[in-house]
Image: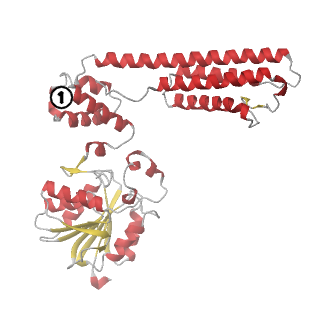
Amino acid sequence: MQEQNRKPSFPIVMLLVSVALWIASLSNVAFYLGNHGSMEGLTVLILGSIFASLDIRYCAVYANYVWLAAIVLLALRKKVVPVHAALWGLALVAFSVKAVYVDEAGNTSDIVRYGAGFYLWYAAFAVATIGTFAGKNKERKAASAADGIKMTFDKWLGLSKLPKNEARMLLQYVSEYTRVQLLTRGGEEMPDEVRQRADRLAQRRLNGEPVAYILGVREFYGRRFTVNPSVLIPRPETEHLVEAVLARLPENGRVWDLGTGSGAVAVTVALERPDAFVRTSDISTPALETARKNAADLGARVEFAHGSWFDTDMPSEGKWDIIASNPPYIENGDKHLLQGDLRFEPQIALTDFSDGLSCIRTLAQGAPDRLAEGGFLLLEHGFDQGAAVRGVLAENGFSGVETLPDLAGLDRVTLGKYMKHLK
């Protein structure tokens, strides 16, 4: 069953506004017909008449133009039934016909033509309003009828406008069923509460919100991490950074993960290598709180520090075998920042608000003073930044610089070894 909306319905609000405009315009037209000899200032422009004068007498006319424009915009957003939106268009045309009026001598035929246009305008206006109201009422009745039909899990999945994998994830979340349970119980009727929650979450996803933020969790390296809008959503590509760290981490090694976000990299390394000492830091306090929660929930032993890159509230004691980071590397103004899930993620975790390499330069410049002899700096970056990042590491004295591809064969992680005698 759908949740009841306590706000006034759109058709009713539209009808009330239309009536108010009709009354205002009727008084305006009465004034015109009684004073037709002084109707100067009317000018015929493109697509009908747009009044050039700002005389107070024309306020109702302007209001109607604004109202009709609003109806067109609402129609484009599918809030008005298209066929009725067309009638609103007819009303606008009729309005233009009646308004093509230039009279200095009070010609009777002009007044008749004016009146005919006036009646055509309001006839279309009335039909459009009533039709829209009836259409929306019909939609509500259809929705009510649908509420009375037995809604099973399988039927909900079939009717959902979401991709099937996303719809299934949402349904698993609200029903607390496993994937297997959802398959075997698909013919069961959905409880009203489950259906309402599923409908709400589906609408949020249709509005563009990432599934990970809706569910509050994201799987990474086989574990479920808490995520929220204060942290970047962990991507499968970042698992390549984790694997590169694990492959180069010596026994009882020391790892510093900078710009941790949700803590996915640091927590995963700590769980995969309990012998290692793992430290992580971030400039965002909410992000650190999320990372702490993930470490606690998953039982990972991680040290946390707050600050910007190497400048933290906890002094760095000793050298590090691995310094790793998935820094902001999207160039400022990149169109992808306005697309898909990126629209909802923290911009400070996505872009350096520069050329996409400024944070990488900071890390490459500061790492040598903090790395142990033979230690590694590993950086995740964009698929088209491999050559540029290799250049940055080479400029800062790293040897054995190489770029590792992801599963798609695209450049994803670049690393370099610190050798003091080669610096």
Which residue is pictured at 45% across the width and 49% down the height? 338
Note whether residue 159 is visible: yes
The percent position of residue 198, horizontal first and vertical second, equals 27, 32
Indicate the quadrant where residue 24 lies: top right
Image coordinates for residue 51, horizontal then vertical, percent: 74, 33
Vertical position of residue 302 compared to residue 31: above or below: below
User: Tag 1: residue type?
Assistant: Leu
Task: Give residue 127's quadrant in the image.
Answer: top right
Quadrant for the C terminus, please. bottom left
Return the residue found at the far left: 275
Q: Residue at x 33, y 26 (%)?
A: 4
Q: Position of residue 225 (x, y in %)?
A: 21, 51
248 vs 382, left or right, is: left
Q: Position of residue 22 (x, y in %)?
A: 62, 22
Quickly name the residue at label 1. Answer: 183
Query: From the image, which quarter does the N terminus lie in?
Result: top left
The crowding category of the residue bearing disc 1, from other C-alpha atoms within 10 Å (few below 14, some 14 to 19, many at least 20), is few
| Residue 204 in which image quadrant | top left
- Using residue 39 as the reference point, say whether residue 20 is left or right of it: left
Q: Residue furthest right?
A: 105
Please name the residue shown 80% across and 17% down the image.
Answer: 111
Residue closer to the observer: 6 or 138: 6
Vertical relation: 236 (above or below) 391: above
Q: Residue furthest bottom?
A: 421
**Kind of element beneath mark 1:** helix
Q: Nearer the viewer, residue 252 or 228?
A: 228
324 sits left or right of 35 in the view? left
Residue 75 located left or right of residue 52: left
